[in-house]
Amino acid sequence: MTAALAQVTDTMGVAIEATLLLVDDDEHVRRALKRVLKRARCRLLEAADAAEGLRALETEPVHVVVSDYRMPGMSGVEFLRQVKERWPRVQRVLLTGQADTAAIEEAVNQSEIFRFIWKPWDDAHLILTIQSAIDQYWLVEENSRLNALIAQRNQELERMNRELDVKLEQRSRALIRAADEWRACFDAISDPLAIVKEDGEVVRGNSAFAKAAGVLINRLPGLVPIRDAFGELPAPRAVSDADETVSEVLHGDRAWLVRTFPFPEVGAVTVWKDVTDEREVTRRLLQAEKMSAVGQLAGGVAHEINNPLGGILAFAQLMSREDRSAEDLENLNLIMDAATRAKKIVESLLRFSRRPKQDERGDVDLARVAEDALFLLSSQIKDGKVEVVRKIDPALCHGNGNLLGQILVNLLVNALQAMRNQGKLTVETGVEGTMCRVRVSDNGPGVPLEIQSRIFEPFFTTKPEGQGTGLGLSICYRIAEEHGGTIRHEPVPGGGASFILEIPQAQQRS
């Protein structure tokens, strides 16, 4: 037990011997104390008075001081008070032979002594007191070490907390920035898009969805019932756990492509795409392809008819050279006239239906182009009650005669359809300045003011279903631009429409 009393181990497991300082002016008392405390195998130091004891404390590591109460020069209470101030961890034991309550109170208040030992002492009690003092020293030492460690750990924790706060702030800013970027991308999508629960409640929607649904974007979350607030949008189908579903829905006069993507634990992401115009363009392109096929078929038929017409004309000419009656010769002349007329019609049809090459350009007389176009439509003009007024003067330009003929035929067809094959049709050609001009006018109902700015748009038409594709005037506009010219519409006073084609005049050759 005494060995445990005198030694402890440091943090590395090395034994540390306790040191006791005995301060008493009576040498016999010091010897008696040393004799008792040797059994504890402590390291013992001794001093005859307080001054010597203070010097020993300045030079030696001391754990416990045992001091007499009455000493010359400085009392034990004053000595232990200075020990407390200068070495507060050293445990202080007062050895006294006086049962003076005032002395005990003074020692407690000034020196904060650990224990009193009365003279004469009991050896067992002395050893037990010293053991407790040494234990108290190491307890204070360990508490101090633990407090220092706690303070160090607290500093580390504070530093880590500050670093975590900085990282948390950085992460928060990054999350806010990512959320803003996501929201900006979400709202930048031009197609209506919404996250919808299974019961139809909106979780979130983009700006396009809010606009189509007719609801402010900040009122979208929690919107119920959503099926009553879709506005121009069709309601989405029921959400399932399957993969992406795609359906095309007719809603009012619009066609919508509705795509639904499962969104686990929420519902689904639904995207609406307005495909009305796309479907209309597809339909019209198909119609244009059909018309192109019809044109090619007509060209093929005209080519096949051209050969028999040539044979009829040749045989009629041969027969007219033989000796025949006047009646037969008259009939043969009628046959040749009819065959010649049919041959011209076929040749005009072939020129119109032939797919022109862009590099097939040369000097073109717009007067001749206008005459050919009128001839091509002569049967349609004769079938109705149309008065044709020709004011045709030579107008030599540089271009592709076939493409320019396509413009003239298109303008004449539009005029005849507008007049419903009865009325007055005026065709004028000539030169003004450096431009060759063709004007096609009619006295039909004219072009309404509200659509005049759109008549050259692709696929725009006011004709009934099946009677027009809306491509004619847009193609004419493109051909005119490719020739460096223009085509425009001018209202006719008193009703009707007038379209003017202008192409740069051909350069004069020296």
Image (spheres, helix red, strand yellow):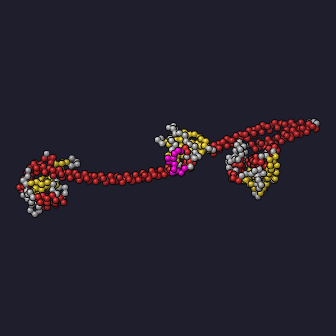
Decide if residue 380 is in sight here. Answer: yes
Residue 190 seen in this snapshot: no
* Main secondary structure of the magenta stretch: loop
Magenta extent: 215-226
Q: Position of residue 211 (x, y in %)?
A: 56, 50
Extreme residue toward the left, this view: 28
* Residue 443 located left or right of residue 101: right
Q: Residue at x 14, y 60 (%)?
A: 106
Query: Which residue is depicted at the point 21% across and 49% down?
Result: 10
| Residue at horizontal 48 percent and vertical 42 percent from the top | 266
Q: Is residue 271 magenta?
A: no
Splitting the image into 4 quarters, where does residue 23 fall?
bottom left
Q: Is residue 232 left or right of residue 136?
A: right
Q: Is residue 150 left or right of residue 287?
A: left
Q: List x then y, in percent, for residue 107.
A: 14, 59
- Quarter holding the N terminus is top left
Number of marks in picture: 0
Q: Nearer the viewer, residue 29 or 109?
A: 109
Measured from the top left, where is residue 130 in percent x and y?
Answer: 13, 51
Q: Determine the residue positioned at 19% across, 51% down.
A: 138
Position in image of residue 498 (x %, y %): 76, 53
Classify the position of the C terminus by image quarter.
bottom right
Q: Compare residues 437 and 250 and report the one nearer the observer.
A: 250
